[in-house]
Image (spheres, rainbow, N blue to C red):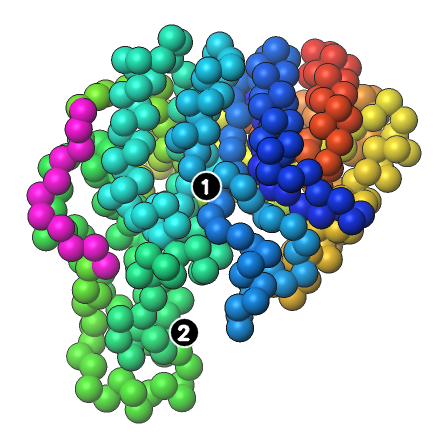
Amino acid sequence: MIFDLFHSLGDPVVRGKSLGAGRCFRQFLEQVKLAEALGMRSVWCAESHFSSEAQKSSPRPSIPHYAGEVGLNADSFQLFHWIVAHTERIGLGTAIHNIVGGSGGPIASADRVNLLRFMNEECWPSPRELGIGIASGRFPYQNAPFGMGPRSRLEAIAWPLFERVAFYEAIEIFLRLTAGESLSSDALAPHELSREQVLAVAGSAAEPELAGVAFPHRVAPRWTFEALRLMPSCASERLRFVLGSSDPKALELARRHGPVDLFNLSFTPPERIEALHAELAAHDPTWKRERLPRTVLVFVDPARGRARQRADAALDAYIEAMRGTAQVPDKQVLLARALVGDAADLRERLAPGNPHGFHQNDRLMLWFEFNQLDGAEVEAQMRYFFEEVAEKL
């Protein structure tokens, strides 16, 4: 079993207190250094853009009940240089890098990843494993300032559909450029939409507005550009891409351009995890379980009652913060998917053949600091987990 560290780099308000950006980053670095010392393979860094507190003043606030900043890391690639300066071997990952809007779009993202790959191979003292998780961004307000919005009345009435097509286009651009291709927008795969697809999103009331639209409707490219090729040229077997999307078409498209891996979340049901492994292995004879990393919330303590209290407090705060904004599983489901308890409890949950959905060849992104502010307490949990759980499995 591979254990990685996941870190939100958020600054939530918990019981009226927050860390402040400086302390948040300093605690993050100490936890990464400890993760390396404990033998974790990689650290996966959440990435966000713009203040979620400021966005509450919008007519359409994305997370109006969330207190504090949901994420402080706006540029993982700058962050990685800082980590490399203070560590020796730990791998680096984005979970997840926005290739649609918040980071400047797929061309800008590919350009930065390409230079990161070059620095890793040619300039850093010790090359690292790089796992670049890609997705379309957590919230629309992070993409809209970069032109990610309807360009016509048709796109306005069926925007979720056109937004998804923009993601497909971004995936192709990003992966083909990072593969070293010379690419222009004329070479991109076309995307067509049927009347039925548009009406399924817009509703039958939009029928009159489609009178002058020819179907199938070919979507105009979101990004138009002449032939581009990234510099400096660099190949690397240490760079992998991981898709952060549950859209099967997005995964299918991505895998046309390379052996893309897939993220999963901590509350994904065990049976869905196994079905995904079976589906992916059926289409890829090289498939390994470690190519489907998933986040797992960890609340561990020598006193199992204290671990449960921590889990209750953190999850109650999370559920309240997300009220009315997203489909959040029931608290009991979240607890069932998390690792909560003392070392014996966690060893039992992670043991081969257990009914909780873990496998001895899984890759788990352990999330210790979820809604917890005390860095020393988080580090104590990390040490206890590795000394009393991981090393005794």
Q: Residue furthest bottom?
A: 208
Residue 262, visible in the rendered structure = no
Residue at 60%, 60% in the rendered image: 63
Q: Is residue 167 magenta?
A: no
Q: Position of residue 60 (x, y in %)?
A: 53, 70
Left or right of 26 in this view: 207: left
Please report the bounds of the magenta region as a residue range: 222-232
Q: Is 168 rendered above or below residue 376?
A: below
Q: Residue 300: horizontal and vertical position, in percent?
A: 78, 28
CB within 8 Å, label 1 to label 2: no
Disc on res. 74: 1
The alpha-carbon separation of the residues under discs 1 and 2 comes to: 32 Å
Q: Position of residue 144 (x, y in %)?
A: 38, 61
Task: Locate residue 198 relative to residue 34 in the image: left or right.
Answer: left
Name the dominant secondary structure of the magenta segment. loop
Q: Earlier in the sequence, mark 1 or mark 2?
A: 1
Q: On the rendered image, what quadrant is the N terminus found in?
A: top right
Q: Is residue 118 visible?
A: yes
Q: Residue at the spot x=67%, y=23% of the render?
A: 352
Q: Does 70 sit left or right of 300 as displayed?
A: left
Type of residue at label 2?
Val
Q: Secondary structure at mark 1?
A: loop
Q: Tag count in the figure?
A: 2
Secondary structure at badge 2 equals: helix
Q: Position of residue 58 (x, y in %)?
A: 53, 68
Q: Which mark is residue 201?
A: 2
- Tell me where residue 175 sits by quadrant: top left
Q: On the image, which quarter does residue 125 sit in?
A: top left
Q: Residue at 51% across / 30% down in the picture?
A: 44
- From this view, report whether residue 316 is shown above or below residue 194: above
